[in-house]
Amino acid sequence: QRPTMVTMEIRGTLTCCVLLATSLTRTLAIPAHSSSFPSSFPSSPPLLNSFTAHSSRPGNSFQHQSGRVVQADKSLERIRGGELSESTRERGPISMFFPISFGLLYFMSVAMAIPALPKLINTIINQSDKVSSRAHLVLSSLLATDAFFTFLTNNLWGTLSDKYGRKPFIVMSSIGISIGALIVGISPVLSLMYIAAAIDGCTSCMFGLGQAYVCDISSPNHLAANLGVFMGVSAGVGFIVGIPLSAILMSKFSTKMPFYVSACIGFLNALNILFICPESLSKESRKAEVRLYDANPVGAIKMLSRNALVRGISLSYFLLWFAHVGLQATWMNFFSFAHGWSNGKSGGVLSVFGIATAILPKLVLKFFSHSDAIKFALLVYSVAMFLLANVSGDKNLYLALTLAALGSTALPSSLSFIANQAKADEKGAMQGASETVKSICSIVGQPIMSSLFAYWIHESRKVKLPGGMYMVSSGLLILSLLVFHFSVENYGCLDRMRRTSE
């Protein structure tokens, strides 16, 4: 009877996942390239058919815009803009469903470990679920090991994917997290867990290459919104399903069961990518040669410093992520300490926050240009951080968090701005470089922001200021806004998208 109840709970959770992901994908997915077609490219099926017949006549040629080739079906081809030759023929339309599918499964694998790993470490060290300082240090060192190897290798996989395609490395990432989870599940000692963390860190390129995949299939005008959909739906729904599913498995079976299931999901995802998902990077768009001595963190910094505009936008993106890491690092503890929220309530709000990140970029970009949308989002995010530091009461907190979700649209919008500065054959390397910036923020920013939070709530302080760290984040976001504004105003002429449109 007991296994039957567990099966029903798991089945219900997965059903909700599928329904939510399908609904969001249908609601939010944006036609990948429609905005990059010339006005002479009709969109209704009859006109498309007549256009195809016309384009097949001898003598017709078309100038490519910035984008990718899209096909309505096997018999229909449309030209995607980009730096491709006129003879380029792509395979077919690549829906946003594909990156969302492998991203969702990947983040489900990741989410399974979030509640299970601390509990497993406590059990190994303390022989109970009791939290201890030693167990917390071991957990922190494992996460730091993972982040360090991610920092070292992200740009390498992004650079190589520009030559060999995205799929081999996305498959590698899925297999890597599966092997890591399996080692943790069967490991009786802590030393093997560090090996698992190193394996996972070395292969942890899913997010960056998933974003590169989205860049490959999206037109520049839709890239920011599509990146928001990828980030929000993949991570948001993955966490909504993975975290409670992990808790169910721990309560019904054992602390190690979530890692076995995580490994199975990862291997299934590898099969999904290998046999179902198409390759997004055509052979014509691949880089002829890669310079491996630049495929490292130093090379990433060089790529993000190629001209004054990219350098300024990258600095703005770094400041934005540093401020955002402050929210990530202290989310649970802040709302528990300052407002008495339970972990369940904080986790639920966090999941909704992630879903909102998928919805809002598309709405914001309807009212602002790309650069103005980033400025607006940075300003709103700064105000939201200030409110989080100072307001009390659930209604006021929900208002501040709503503004924070709106402001966090600066993340995909800034990322797409950087991605649009890359050439057609270096989008993977550019995404790897952007992920290197995030890794630096994780390695450096999380300890700094966590230390600030710990300082302001220390027992020795007469007046405790748990929100003081968010005041720092608010200031960083204002600085990010100023850097972005100055860069665009003074070096906007270097924008590749502006030069292409002119």
Image (tube, rainbow, N blue to C red):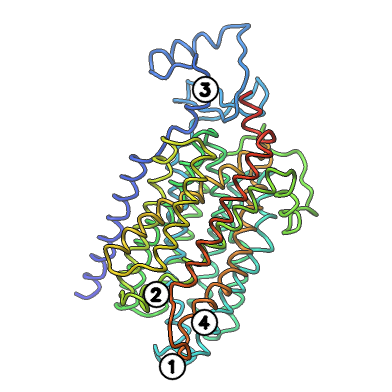
Specify which label sits upstream in the sequence, 2 or 4.
2
Q: Where is residue 61 in the image (x, y as percent from the top left)?
A: 62, 12
Does the CB distance between marks 3 and 1 fall below 8 Å? Answer: no
Q: Residues within 10 Å of mark 1 (few under 14, many from 20)?
A: few
Residue lying furthest left: 1
Who is closer to the viewer here, 258 or 147? 147
Asked if 26 appears above or below 236 in the picture, the reply is: above
Contact between marks 2 and 4 (CB within 8 A): the answer is no
- Where residue 461 appears, as percent x and y from the top left, is 47, 87
Q: What element carries label 3?
A: loop
Q: What residue type is labelled 2?
A: Met
Reading the image, the residue beneath label 2 is: 257
Give the labeled residue for mark 1. Answer: 127
Nearest to N terminus: mark 2 or mark 3: 3
Relative to 164, is 48 above or below? above
Residue 456 x %, y %: 48, 80
Q: Residue at the spot x=64%, y=23% of the render? A: 502
The residue pinned by badge 3 equals: 37
Real-space Cα distance between discs 1 and 4?
Answer: 30 Å
10 vs 78, left or right, is: left
**Residue furthest out toward the front:** 463
Of 290 and 489, nearer the camera is 489
Q: Which amino acid does label 4 sit on?
A: Tyr
Residue hosting label 4: 455
